[in-house]
Image (cartoon, rainbow, N blue to C red):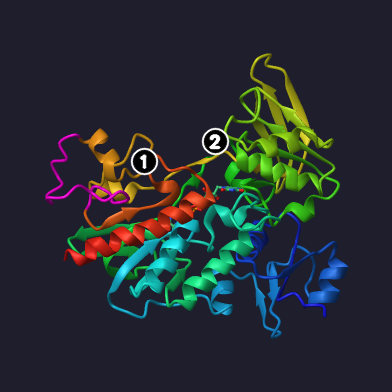
Amino acid sequence: METLPAVRLYGKRGSPQAYAIRDFLQRSDIPFEWIELRDDVQAHKELGLEGVDDARLPICVFPDGTRMERPTVRQVTEKLGWFRHPSRSEYDIAIYGAGPAGLSASVYAASEGLKTVLVERFAVGGQASTSPRIENYLGFPEGISGGELAERAREQAAKFGAEILIHRAGVRGEFAPFKGVVDLDDGTRLCSRVSVCTTGVEYRRLGLPGEDKFLGAGVYYGAGASEAQLCSNEHVVMVGAGNSSAQASLHLSRYARKVTIVMRGERLNDNVSEYLVDRVTHTPNIEILPKSKVVVLHGDDMLHAVTIRNCETGEEREIETSFLFLCLGGLPNTQWAKEVGIIRDEQGYLVTGPDLRKFAPTMDSWKLNREPYYLETSMPGVFAAGDVRHGSIKRVASAVGEGAMTIAFVHRYLASG
Ligand SMILES: Cc1cc2nc3c(=O)[nH]c(=O)nc-3n(C[C@H](O)[C@H](O)[C@H](O)COP(=O)(O)OP(=O)(O)OC[C@H]3O[C@@H](n4cnc5c(N)ncnc54)[C@H](O)[C@@H]3O)c2cc1C
C-alpha cells in the first residue's frame, strides 16, 4: 500500500524559509513532498495565491488539512506536537545537544531510571542527521540514513521516558555541587543534579561576502541531504576534503550532472575511509579540483555562479551553479563554558578526565579528593561527550559510545552525593 506524504510544502526555488523547513523535516525523518511552484498560474490554481512572489509562501499543508502560511520551523514543530515545556522543576540529568552522543546518553540515563531531559537547538540527530547514508555504523550492513537513525534513537529515548525539548538552546549555566542551573534561549530555566554537554561542533564558514544572503538559497552547510533530489541535471560544487564531503559528493553524484569537489590540499584527507576514496575517484561525474578555493559567490536573490581560484597558479575559473555545499568541518561553540571557568583547549573543545592535567597540571580549582572521571570536565558534575570533547574521534559510533559511558560515571557521581 502506498504511504501518503505527511506534509506538503509549497514554495519558490531558492527560498531560504522553505529550505529551513525542508532541512528540518528531512533531518527529522518526517515524510514530506516539496512542490516547487513554477509560475503564477500554478500558484493561483493550487493555492489561490496571486503568484510565486506572494508573501504568504512557503505554505505547509499537513495531512489533517491544516494550512500554515509562511510558518517558522518552530511553528511546524508545534504543529507536529514536538514542542513541549519541561514537566519538572528539577531533573537528575540534563543533556544539551541531541546528536548521537546526547541521544545515546538519554537512552541510557532514562532506561536506568534517571529523570532525564534532553535539550536540542534545532533538529534531533545533530550532524549525523544531515548525512544521507551512514555506512560504517555497526549493525546496518546496507547503511542507514542519518535522519532514520536519529528518529529511531529519538523514539527509543522517549520510550524510556526522556523528555525531549526541541528548538531550544542552552545559553549559559551556573554549576554548584549536585545543582546545575541552565538558561535556555527562550527564557526557560532548567535545574538538574548533573549536566552533560553533547553540543558537537558548528560548521566552519567560508567567510565570503554574500554567504549569509545565499544561505538556503544556493549555499548549504553540510551534505544537503534534503537538496540532493533537487540537483538533477545541475552542476554542483562541494567544498571540503573530509569524510562528510566525500560521502555527500557520492550521494549528490547520483542526481547531479556533475559534482566538482574543491579542496585546498592535494587529495582527500588521510582519515577518509578507503572505500570512499575509491568510490569518489572512480565516479565519472565527480571532478576534483585540488589546491583550490572558492573566492567569489555570484548572484542576486539566489546563487548562480562561483569563482574558484587555484592557490598555486592563481588561475581563476567560474562555474555556473545554484548549489554550493560546504563540508568544512567545524568548531565547538562553548563560550558558556569559558564564562564559568571550565577548562577548554585552544580551539574551545571541552577537556575531560585524564587530559585535564595536561592543560592545568595543578588543577587548583578541583577540590575533590578524587580525580575527574574520564568524561567529566573540570567542573564536578558537568560531563562532556562526543565531538565537543577534546580528543574525541568524530564518528557516530564513538559519540554513541561516549554518551553511554557518561551515564556510568553519572551514577558514580550521584552515588557520592
Ligand atoms: C555530512 C556528514 C556525514 C557524516 N558521516 C558520517 C559517517 O558516515 N560515519 C560516521 O561515523 N560519522 C559521520 N559523520 C560524523 C558524525 O556525524 C559526528 O561525529 C557525530 O554526529 C557527532 O555526534 P555528537 O552528538 O557529538 O555531535 P553532533 O552530531 O554535532 O550533535 C550536536 C547537537 O547539539 C546541538 N546543539 C549545539 N549547541 C546547542 C545548545 N547550545 N543547546 C542545545 N543544543 C545544541 C546541535 O544542534 C546538534 O544537534 C558525518 C558528519 C557529517 C556532517
| Circle 1 or circle 2, nearest the eye | 1
Query: Residue beneath label 1, please?
Result: 348
Residue at point 37%, 60% (across, down): 170
Mark 1 touches mark 2? (CB < 8 Å): no
Residue at point 64%, 69% (across, down): 70
Query: In this rendering, does residue 27 appear at all?
Result: no
Q: Is residue 372 magenta?
A: yes
Query: Residue beneath label 2, please?
Result: 207
Magenta segment range?
361-379
Residue at point 63%, 59% (across, down): 23
Can you say whether 337 is above or below 179 in the image? above
Q: Is residue 309 left or right of residue 395?
A: right
x then y, percent, for residue 241: 62, 33
Q: Is residue 342 left or right of residue 325?
A: left
Question: Split into 4 quadrants, where in the image is the N terminus?
Answer: bottom right
The front one of 368 and 253 is 368
Label 1 crowd (10 A; few <14 / some 14-19 / many >=20): some
Q: Quadrant of residue 278?
A: top right
Mark linked to residue 290:
none
x then y, percent, for residue 264: 61, 26
Q: Amino acid at mark 1?
A: Gly
Residue at point 78%, 73% (across, down): 49
* Element marked by disc 2: loop
Q: Is residue 76 magenta?
A: no
Q: Amino acid at mark 2?
A: Gly
x then y, percent, for residue 104: 46, 62
Name which of mark 1 and mark 2 comes first in the sequence.
2
Q: Is residue 106 left or right of residue 328?
A: left
